[in-house]
């Protein structure tokens, strides 16, 4: 895989994966809270989404940099 293809993957994968995390957490909260997700839970999910997104970007770009500079 070329470096540009890896960068493209680095840009696309984290939002998709974080979106899946958000969808799963929203579904779980809706199930547990009987269909009504509270405002506190929504705020926590927003913060969690951002943290997962930032973590995934750091992981993806860190892995790309590591592979690029060690080969």
Image (cartoon, grey):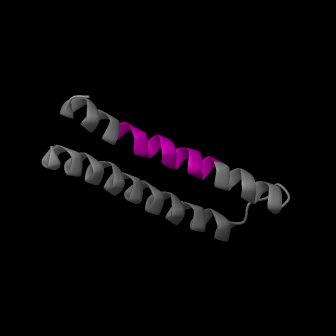
Percent across and percent down for residue 62 are: 27, 54
* Residue 18 falls inside the magenta stretch: yes
Q: Main secondary structure of the magenta part?
A: helix
* Residue 17 falls inside the magenta stretch: yes
Q: Nearer the viewer, residue 35 or 68?
A: 68
Residue at x-position 25% and y-position 37%: 7
**Magenta-colored span:** 11-23
Q: Is residue 2 left or right of residue 13?
A: left
**Is 15 placed above or below 6 here?**
below
Residue at x-position 21% and y-position 29%: 2
Residue at x-position 22% and y-position 46%: 67
Q: Quadrant of the N terminus?
A: top left
**Is 16 placed above or below 45 here?**
above
Percent across and percent down for residue 66 are: 22, 51
Q: Is residue 61 left or right of residue 69?
A: right
Q: Residue furthest bottom?
A: 40
Percent across and percent down for residue 71 are: 15, 43
Q: Residue furthest front?
A: 71
Which quadrant holds residue 50?
bottom left
Residue at x-position 20% and y-position 49%: 65
Q: Nearer the viewer, residue 62 or 17?
A: 62
Percent across and percent down for residue 48 are: 53, 63
């Amino acid at each position: 895989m070329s470096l540009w293809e890896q960068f493209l993957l680095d840009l696309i994968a984290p939002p998709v994966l974080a979106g899946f995390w958000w969808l799963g957490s929203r579904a779980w909260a809706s199930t547990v809270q009987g269909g009504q997700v509270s405002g506190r839970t929504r705020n926590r999910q927003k913060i969690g989404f951002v943290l997962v997104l930032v973590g995934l970007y750091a992981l993806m770009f860190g892995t790309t940099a590591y592979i690029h500079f060690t080969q």
